[in-house]
């Protein structure tokens, strides 16, 4: 079993398989799972558990658990007066109303926290809450003790504060009419190595120091003026002071702070006032363990050690106080420590008073406390116990939740205190624990209800040794093999199937947090049936003796298969978009590439473009079969992106083209993102052909005809030229042959004309026959 955060998982190993069942306390009876055998054990299991002390509670043949939720006990027949279910509660013991003003005749009764005293009764695990209100009242009394470092380095500052009392009083009276001042000073321990201890320095530590040759002897802490409203006394005391000298840089300021905090009577701290301790120094103070350098091995005891002269008498006997001790004593006496020299102290006081923070004192270890602050804006801030930026007179509240983790020994009571930091007011909280049952007050020993063989308490018998049964009616000697056989389903089987006890010849079945165990031999139950995703019978059936009886509309061993097909109908009204079959109320897609709850997504299907085309038409152009607005919105939920130019180089998209009614071409792409969303990317407008201009066509035709004529003429000229050249070449060849023949033929003789004119005529004819070629 694995438990985590109010939930647990049960891991069952069966036939080499692992089954994980998840439960929460809301669906599992945690009270019965604890197998409590007494009322006190039941109350510790869970704060919601109750115990039935009714004598005749329970059914026959069942070991009824008396520990259960109270509502279950009522349903099972336990009367309300017999149900033990103590709850946590709160009682107001002192709740005076908050005051609105601090000074006046009733200043000692000023109330700044409400309530002032309460009592809590806590049952372990059962949370209870109460509200605390805090109001910093107006004109509240203030005590301010000024603690001054009088080492030599503070000489200039001493001159500065000569008239500090008057200034402080003037400014602080702007905030309160009841203001008192006190004064004290410190240097350091008068031992080596912290101070000059040679005899010549005892009366004047500045002896031989040229810059400032005269000063008073070194001292640890000196209380000079108790808190008073006489400001002139403060100024007079400051005027008298002279500086001293120590050896090292750190001072003994922490010794002085602790004495000013714990010596309440001599300082004059008023219980009803606001306490401010102003610490003026120019260097860091010594801390605990520094005193060992001077041989001081005893730690500081945190007590007041002022002698008759109001001087710190243990300065050379104990070590410096630690930060932890100092913080404890300041908080214990409600003192605000202000580290300041030149600050305006009334401003610091005003800032301190603008904040309220709760602190817890003597917090019992077995209690959990949780705070929720509601400041001036009225918004609850879980986990915070502080409010800031308040005005004097503002009221803030804190919700405090308390939870007990366990039960202390009987009769134990505890207490703690809630106190606003720096306030004298506080809330006292006393705590008692509700871990006992009232029915134990009526316990009977040797009760006749237990056949005088046991103790009757809270509805049950606790049998004496040697006796058994719900009423101690059987003796252990009666239990033998023959007696137990009546409680076995068959020879070799476990007694009462291992899920009950054989009591007086019959099986008394155990009660289980998982459900009911029943049957003659406790062989049946209502929780061992098949599950789906950890839910018994899928939540659609009842478990009867290991078998799921399915509700109408469901089938299967674990009733997880629905016979309804409504969830398989796609937007177009088809079962699984015509691409699959509906099995157990879910689509199983059979078309390759189809997916989605209703197989509606299929980029690679043949009809993908046709299906998405209708959505393009209705969404972009309000046309097509789905042009009706409601139909388009219902069936076309894909994202459509319009672009000027469509990219077609993505291998993960399907390219789609279709012809519109206007003989235009519309192009888009279809893709599925990893998120499962379909995305259509389409052109803003379809691509349409443009009709040519008539004049342009005419010019183009005429130009084409002229061009063709020119080309034909050029071709004709080329052919004629080639033909003439061939003929001329043939003529030249024939002429050459004729000359050769005339020159070499012995028979031929050229005729000689008889008359010169005949000769000329003859030559002329020859030229004519030769085409005029010379």
Image: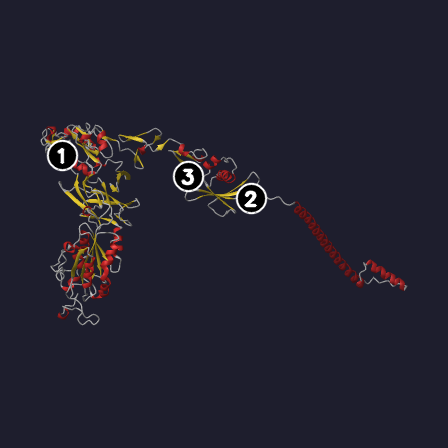
Q: Position of residue 169 (x, y in %)?
A: 23, 56
How many marks can you see? 3
Residue at 38% across, 33% down: 585
> How far, Cα to Cα, is label 3 from label 1?
65 Å
Q: What x and y, as percent, mark residue 300?
A: 14, 58
Quick one: quadrant of the C terminus?
bottom right
Q: What is the CA distance from the residue labelled 2 to the residue labelled 3?
A: 33 Å
Q: Image quadrant of residue 663?
A: top right
**Residue 504, x across and y down, in percent:** 15, 28
Vertical comparison of 598 with 169: above or below: above
Label 1 secondary element:
helix
Check if mark 3's residue and mark 1's residue have beta carbons within 8 Å: no
Q: Quadrant of residue 378?
A: top left
Q: Secondary structure at mark 3?
A: loop
Task: Name the side, left or right, on which 391 lies relative to 251.
Answer: right
For discs 3 and 1, the disc positioned in front in the rendered view = 1
Crowding near the residue tagged with mark 1, few <14, some 14–19, many ≥20 C-alpha atoms within 10 Å: some
- Which element type, helix, strand or loop, lies under badge 2? loop
Cα distance in 3D space between marks 2 and 1: 94 Å
Q: Earlier in the sequence, mark 3 or mark 1?
A: 1
Give the percent coordinates (x, y) of residue 266.
14, 56
**381 with respect to 51 (left or right):** right
Residue 687 - label? 2
Q: On the image, numbered disc 1 is attached to which residue?
A: 440
Residue 429 is drawn in which quadrant?
A: top left
Question: Vertical placement of 50 versus 314: above or below?
Answer: above
Work out whether residue 523 can be spotted.
no
Going from N to C along the chain, the mark reached first, 2 or 1, is 1
Q: From the viewer's side, name the closer residue of 485 and 78.
A: 78
**Residue 596 tag number:** 3
Task: Give the camera-side residue of 7 and 720.
Answer: 7
């Amino acid at each position: 079993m694995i438990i985590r955060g109010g939930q647990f998982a049960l891991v069952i190993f069966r036939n080499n398989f692992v089954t994980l069942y998840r439960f929460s306390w809301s669906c599992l009876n945690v009270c019965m799972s604890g197998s409590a055998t007494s009322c006190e054990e039941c109350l510790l299991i869970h704060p919601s558990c109750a115990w039935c002390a009714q004598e005749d509670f329970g059914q026959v043949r069942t070991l009824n658990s008396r520990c259960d939720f109270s509502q279950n006990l009522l349903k099972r027949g336990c009367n309300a007066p017999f149900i033990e279910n103590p709850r946590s509660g709160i009682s107001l013991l002192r709740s005076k109303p908050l005051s609105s003003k601090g000074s006046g005749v009733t200043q000692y009764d000023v109330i700044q926290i409400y309530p002032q005293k309460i009592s809590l009764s806590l049952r372990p695990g059962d949370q209870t809450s109460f509200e605390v209100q805090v109001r910093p009242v107006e004109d509240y009394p203030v005590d301010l003790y000024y603690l001054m470092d009088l080492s030599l380095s503070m000489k200039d500052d001493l001159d500065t504060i000569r008239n500090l009392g008057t200034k402080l009083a003037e400014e602080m009276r702007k905030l309160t009419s009841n203001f008192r001042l006190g004064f004290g000073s410190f240097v350091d321990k008068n031992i080596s190595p912290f101070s000059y201890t040679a005899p010549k320095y005892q009366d004047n530590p500045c002896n031989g120091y040229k810059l400032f040759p005269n000063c008073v002897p070194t001292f640890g802490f000196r209380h000079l003026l108790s808190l008073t409203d006489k400001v002139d006394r403060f100024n007079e005391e400051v005027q008298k002071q002279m500086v001293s000298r120590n050896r090292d840089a750190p001072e003994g300021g922490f010794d002085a702070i602790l004495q000013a905090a714990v010596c309440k009577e001599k300082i004059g701290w008023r219980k009803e006032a606001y306490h401010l301790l102003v610490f003026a120094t120019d260097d860091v103070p010594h801390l605990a363990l520094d005193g060992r350098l001077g041989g001081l091995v005893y730690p500081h005891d945190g007590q007041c050690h002022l002698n008759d002269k109001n001087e710190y008498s243990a300065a050379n006997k104990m070590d410096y106080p630690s930060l932890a001790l100092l913080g404890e004593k300041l908080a214990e006496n409600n003192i605000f420590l202000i580290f300041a020299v030149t600050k305006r102290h009334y401003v610091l006081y005003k800032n301190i008073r603008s904040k309220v923070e709760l602190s817890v004192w003597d917090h019992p270890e077995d209690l959990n406390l949780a705070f929720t602050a509601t400041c001036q804006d009225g918004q609850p801030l879980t986990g915070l116990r502080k409010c800031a930026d308040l005005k004097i007179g503002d009221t803030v509240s804190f919700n405090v939740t308390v939870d007990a983790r366990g039960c202390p020994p009987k009769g134990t009571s505890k207490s703690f205190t809630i106190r606003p930091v720096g306030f004298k007011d506080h809330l006292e909280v006393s705590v008692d624990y509700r871990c006992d049952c009232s029915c134990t007050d009526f316990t009977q020993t040797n009760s006749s209800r237990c056949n005088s063989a046991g103790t009757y308490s809270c509805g049950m018998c606790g049998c004496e040794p040697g006796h058994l049964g719900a009423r101690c009616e059987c003796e252990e000697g009666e239990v033998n093999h023959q007696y137990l056989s009546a409680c076995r389903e068959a020879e070799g089987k476990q007694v009462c199937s291992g899920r009950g006890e054989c009591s007086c010849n019959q099986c008394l079945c155990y009660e289980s947090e998982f459900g009911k165990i029943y049957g003659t031999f406790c062989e049946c139950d209502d929780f061992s049936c098949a599950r789906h995703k950890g839910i018994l019978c899928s939540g659609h059936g009842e478990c009867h003796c290991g078998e799921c009886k399915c509700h109408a509309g469901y089938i299967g061993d674990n009733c997880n298969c629905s016979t309804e097909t409504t969830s398989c109908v796609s937007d177009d009204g088809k079962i699984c978009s015509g691409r699959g079959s509906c099995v157990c109320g879910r689509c199983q897609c059979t078309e390759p590439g189809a997916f989605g709850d209703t197989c509606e997504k299929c980029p690679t299907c043949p009809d993908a473009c046709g299906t998405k085309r209708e959505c393009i038409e209705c969404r972009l152009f309000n046309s097509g079969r789905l042009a009706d607005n409601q139909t388009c919105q219902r069936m076309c939920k894909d994202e459509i992106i319009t672009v000027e130019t469509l990219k077609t180089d993505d291998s993960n998209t399907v390219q789609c083209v279709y012809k519109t009614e206007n003989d235009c071409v519309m192009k888009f792409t279809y893709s599925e993102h990893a998120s499962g969303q379909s995305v259509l990317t389409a052109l803003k407008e379809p691509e349409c052909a443009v009709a040519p201009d008539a004049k342009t066509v005419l010019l183009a035709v005429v130009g084409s005809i002229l061009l063709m004529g020119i080309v034909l003429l050029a071709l004709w000229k080329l052919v004629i030229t080639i033909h003439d050249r061939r003929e001329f070449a043939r003529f030249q060849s024939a002429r050459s042959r004729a000359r050769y023949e005339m020159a070499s033929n012995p028979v031929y003789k050229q005729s000689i004309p008889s008359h010169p004119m005949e000769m000329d005529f003859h030559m002329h004819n020859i030229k004519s026959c030769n085409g005029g070629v010379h």
